[in-house]
Amino acid sequence: VMALLDAQGLASAHIVGHSYGGLVALRCALDHPARVCTLAVLDTTGLGPTSTDFRRKWAHARTAEDIREAVSLAFEDQSVPAGRLDMIVEGQLAYRAEPNVMAVLAKLNDVSGAWMDEVERRVDEIQAPLLAMWGAEDRATPAAHADRVRGMPNAQVHLVEGAGHAVQIEAAQEVNDRLLRFLDAQPPGAGHA
């Protein structure tokens, strides 16, 4: 992430991450605090135990059937429109066909435990304004993990009822509105990238 900021000539940025991306975002805020203006994490790993079943299925899914099974664990609403589910499956099949992607996913599944433990231990060190959003019915990373940041003076927690791990898909309007309100509430010029 920092290499991307450097390549773009950005000193700092607002960072948003979902699931493993949330774990990466949290690490950025811990390891490079001056470069993170604000931080928003959605159903993030790194704040408590995650479903090993979900992580294993997601990391090792190779076929459309495997991906559909893993994706079903991410949605609270199992009536996901077929077109949307097909789009996710097709995108994942194409992504997973790229060289080394499956090896990277397996490696992430193997090493993420150490990262998660470190982030959970150090999360109180994060200084950037933090928005943690969770699907209230998340079966992969339970919404109770939001309690880990709830008492931090710079943190806001927002639970989305009726949504699971794919909160940004299941409740896109609510998630986007909340994220925009969070960003708009930051002082003008306060590190806005």
Image (spheres, rainbow, N blue to C red):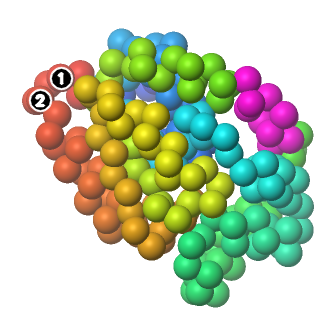
Q: Please tell me whether residue 157 belongs to the stretch shown in magenta.
A: no
Q: Quadrant of residue 140?
A: bottom right
Q: Is residue 40 above or below residue 164?
A: above
Mark 1 residue crowding within 10 angstroms, few (<14) / some (14–19) / many (20+): few
The residue labelled by disc 2 is 187
Q: Please tell me whether residue 106 belongs to the stretch shown in magenta.
A: yes
Q: Amino acid at mark 1?
A: Ala
Q: Is residue 52 above or below residue 122?
A: below
Is there any visible trace of residue 3 in the rendered image? no
The residue labelled by disc 1 is 190
- Residue 2: x, y in percent? 52, 20
Secondary structure beneath label 2? loop
Q: Are marks 2 and 1 in contact (CB under 8 Å)?
A: yes
Q: Amino acid at mark 2?
A: Pro
Distance Cα–Cα, label 2 vs label 1: 5 Å
What residue is shown at x 29% (from left), y 40% (from top)? Answer: 156
* Stretch in magenta: 104-114
Mark 2 residue crowding within 10 angstroms, few (<14) / some (14–19) / many (20+): few
